[in-house]
Image: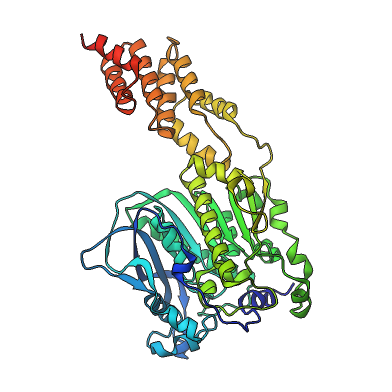
């Protein structure tokens, strides 16, 4: 398929109906953190660039506009931003810094000048203008936008994730020599991948970021660029694609000299649009196989791959811009309420995937492994398929084999590495408790038992029983100060722990 035809299809739908949506009606369940936002421009001195609107041949160092959302404490004078504040960023990225605001909705192809869209400009968003970043460290998401789009295209999703304890960095999708891409080519993809790599280096400037917990997320063409970025860069923990073009234009990915399927060995989730109706396929000259084929998914063998299809979303509505500003296609689009509800569902699934893969959150891991119906989601809204890596069904016994191989040393880093590749792994509290005691009571392996308890309490930090067992291990090994300390911790969590009461009474006498 001609890549330019696909780009035109996904970004310029037949648009006859005006949107009537709002951020308030989307109703994303914000997390416990206030959200800070900053936008600045960095410079990649290794590449040259030309400002297209200057109409000259002057070459400059490549500018990288960066938008960043993060957990924060608002200053006393802080005010929440508006949608118009975000569009001011859009003007700078589109190289129209001095464009009068009254032209905004007329000027850019993905904004439409309707009364409903004009009303969006004054809507309050979640981010604050003046904040102090929280210390963290927080896991980080590096985002790649859709074809020639802005770093802020999914601002509502970014704010939602930042409120849940993530840092998000994004830069616009730009061509190699100028603002304009050349048609969705392999060169375009590699250019965007280099911009993502610039952000991967840039994030080390921020002390609140955990550089060992990084996910890539992208929409449309950004998903394609991110797949290549993973193949070129170790150290990324997860890949999340919002109807990414790696599904629809696999040959562009495969044509890169950096293409290497074996290096895409991390958890990967692809969230796809609804089935395109037959009449739309015919009238827009879209190949029917786009509804069914996914060669990248078929080819992956090294990682867990999650496929979701959102039956109420067409491609444009995988971004905040699309939900709020895009006109509707009466041939296939659902109602405004259904679009907003599914965008919220998309945000919730993105959060669960990121919590499972970056934070090893047990509830999120179960959510990923469940079917939609097990998560109380109607089948008419969402369908899912899962492919596990070759040699999957990695369980606690496999983990223990690895732990034995390193003398039970470094168990927490080992767990973090393993869970990144096998998010289905579940180390039960009872199993770890039994293993810890079994090793602790062996005179030759007592230190190994203590290391197992360290991992167990990393996973279950509020377990009174684990502290009680760790105290027994120290008691058996004649570490009385540590025994007292851990019996006290157990008793603080469970004041009715009679064993801890009795042991402390005896140890203090």
Vertical position of residue 121 compared to residue 212: above or below: below
Vertical position of residue 371 compared to residue 283: above or below: above
Left or right of 136? Residue 452 is: right
Image quarter of the N terminus? bottom right
Q: Position of residue 138 (x, y in %)?
A: 38, 50
Left or right of 256? Residue 84 is: left
Tell me how the rendering is colored: rainbow
Q: Which of the pair 108/411 is nearer the observer? A: 108
Q: Position of residue 257 (x, y in %)?
A: 64, 61
Q: How many marks?
A: 0
Q: Which of the pair 184/328 is nearer the observer? A: 328
Q: Quadrant of residue 161?
A: bottom left
Vertical position of residue 426 compared to residue 195: above or below: above
Image quarter of the C terminus? top left
| Residue at 71% from the left image edge and 52% from the top image edge | 299
The answer to whether residue 234 shows anywhere in this view is no
Q: Quadrant of residue 472?
A: top left
| Residue at 75% from the left image edge and 60% from the top image edge | 293
């Amino acid at each position: 398929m001609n890549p330019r035809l696909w780009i035109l299809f996904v970004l310029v739908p037949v648009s006859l109906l005006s949107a009537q949506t709002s951020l308030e009606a989307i109703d994303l369940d914000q997390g416990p953190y206030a959200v800070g936002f900053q936008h600045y421009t960095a410079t990649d001195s290794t590449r040259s660039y030309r400002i297209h609107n200057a109409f000259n041949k002057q070459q400059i160092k490549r500018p990288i506009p960066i938008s960043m959302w993060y957990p924060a404490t608002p200053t006393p004078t802080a005010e929440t931003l508006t949608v118009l504040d975000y569009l001011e960023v859009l003007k700078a990225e589109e190289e129209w810094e001095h464009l009068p605001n009254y032209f905004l909705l007329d000027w850019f192809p993905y904004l439409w000048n309707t009364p409903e869209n004009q009303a969006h400009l004054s809507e309050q968003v979640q981010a604050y203008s003046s904040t102090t970043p929280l210390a963290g460290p927080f896991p980080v998401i590096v985002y790649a936008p859709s074809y020639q789009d802005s770093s802020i295209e999914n601002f509502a999703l970014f704010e939602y994730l930042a409120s849940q304890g993530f840092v998000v960095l994004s830069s616009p999708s730009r061509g190699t020599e100028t603002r304009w891409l050349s048609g969705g080519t392999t060169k375009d993809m590699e250019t965007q991948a280099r911009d993502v790599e610039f952000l991967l280096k840039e994030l080390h400037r921020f002390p609140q970021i955990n550089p060992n917990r990084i996910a890539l997320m992208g929409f449309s063409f950004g998903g394609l660029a991110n797949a290549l970025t993973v193949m070129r860069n170790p150290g990324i923990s997860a890949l999340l694609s919002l109807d990414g073009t790696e599904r629809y234009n696999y040959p562009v990915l495969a044509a890169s000299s950096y293409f290497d399927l074996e290096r895409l060995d991390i958890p990967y989730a692809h969230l796809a649009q609804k089935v395109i109706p037959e009449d739309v396929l015919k009238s827009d000259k879209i190949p029917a196989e786009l509804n069914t084929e996914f060669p990248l998914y078929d080819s992956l063998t090294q990682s867990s791959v999650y496929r979701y299809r959102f039956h109420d979303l067409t491609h444009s509505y995988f971004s905040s811009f699309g939900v709020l500003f895009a006109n509707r296609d009466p041939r296939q689009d659902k109602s405004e309420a259904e679009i907003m509800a599914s965008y919220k569902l998309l945000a919730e699934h993105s959060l669960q995937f990121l919590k499972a893969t970056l934070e090893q959150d047990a509830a999120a891991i179960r959510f990923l492994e469940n079917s939609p119906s097990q998560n109380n989601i109607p089948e008419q809204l969402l369908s899912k398929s899962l492919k596990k890596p070759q040699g999957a069904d990695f369980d606690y016994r496999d983990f223990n084999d690895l732990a034995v191989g390193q003398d039970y040393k470094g168990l927490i880093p080992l767990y973090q590495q393993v869970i990144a590749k096998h998010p289905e792994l579940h180390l039960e509290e009872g199993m770890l408790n039994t293993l810890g005691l079994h090793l602790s009571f062996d005179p030759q392996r007592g230190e190994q038992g203590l290391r197992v308890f360290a991992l167990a309490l990393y996973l279950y930090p509020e377990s009174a029983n684990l502290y009680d067992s760790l105290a027994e291990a120290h008691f058996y090994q004649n570490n009385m100060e540590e025994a007292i300390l851990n019996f006290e911790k157990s008793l603080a969590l469970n004041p009715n722990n009679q064993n801890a009461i009795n042991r402390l009474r005896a140890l203090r006498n």
